[in-house]
Image (cartoon, rainbow, N blue to C red):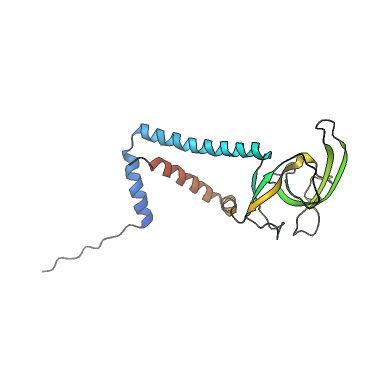
Amino acid sequence: MSQPITPTATPSPFMSFVYDNIAPLKRMRYKQILFQIISFGLIISSALMIWKSLMLFTGSECPIVVVLSGSMEPAFHRGDLLFLYMSDAPFQVGEIVVFKIVDREIPIVHRIIKVHERSHNSTLGLPETEILTKGDNNQVDDRGLYQRGQLWLKREHILGRAMGFLPYVGMVTIIMNDFPIVKYLLIAFLGFFVLVSREQ
C-alpha cells in the first residue's frame, strides 16, 4: 500500500526573513542588545552632527528642503531636494529663496519678483530689505500667503537661497509625511535591523 502524502506549507519570504532574524535576537545576551541599542543611538547622533555641520557650512538653519508642491514648476517639481545657503549679499530679483511665515510650520520655496532696500539696519549694519515673492506656476504674488496685513518679507524671514537640487529624491519624505505609518514602519525596521546585525 502506498503511504499517504502529507501536504507541506512553504513559508513566505517575509516570514522566513522574520524567523531567520528573530532566532538570533532571542539568543543575544542583554549586553549584546545594549551594545546594539547604543550603536543605533550613535547612528542617530552622527546624522544630527552632519546636519549641524551643514548648517554651519552653509550659513542656513535649514540647508536641505524638499519641494512639496508644484508652485515652482517648471523650475522645480514636487519631490525635488533643494540645497540652500545663506549670505549677507543683497537679494536679487529672480533669485529663488526659501522663507518661513510666522505661525506656518512648512517653509515655502518661491522666486523673488521685487526688492526694496531702505536705510541701513543699525543693529546688523545691513540694508533694510523688503522682498516680494511669487511661485513661477502661480498667477498672483505671495501676499495672500503672508500674515494678515504683511506686504513684504524681511531678511529674517528668509531661511536660505537655492544653490542646487536633486530631482525627485525627496519623494520619500513626502510619502512619509502623507502616510505616517510608512515612517513608523521604516524606523521600526531600521531599529530591528541594527539589533539583529552582529559580527558573524
Q: Is residue 63 left or right of residue 102?
A: left
34 relative to 159, above or below: above
Q: Is residue 137 left or right of residue 78?
A: right
Quadrant of the rendered image containing residue 127: top right
Residue 190, position as x, y percentages in the image: 46, 45
Q: Nearer the viewer, residue 196 or 159?
A: 159
Answer whether residue 49 is visible to the viewer in this image.
yes
Q: Which image quadrant: the N terminus? A: bottom left
Q: Residue furthest right?
A: 119
Quadrant of the rendered image containing residue 159: top right
Q: Nearer the viewer, residue 193 or 8?
A: 193
Answer whether residue 105 is visible to the viewer in this image.
no
Q: Is residue 157 left or right of residue 47?
A: right
Residue 188, position as x, y percentages in the image: 47, 45
Residue 167, position as x, y percentages in the image: 62, 56
Q: Identify the residue shown where x is 65% and y is 56%.
A: 78
Q: Identify the residue shown where x is 86% and y is 45%.
A: 116
Q: Residue furthest left?
A: 1
Q: Nearer the viewer, residue 34 or 123?
A: 123
Q: Nearer the viewer, residue 115 or 157?
A: 115
Residue 111, position as x, y percentages in the image: 76, 52
Q: Identify the residue shown where x is 65% and y is 38%.
A: 57
Q: Identify the residue shown where x is 64% and y is 52%.
A: 165
Q: Is residue 181 left or right of residue 77?
A: left
Q: Which image quadrant: the C terminus? A: top left
107 relative to 137, above or below: above
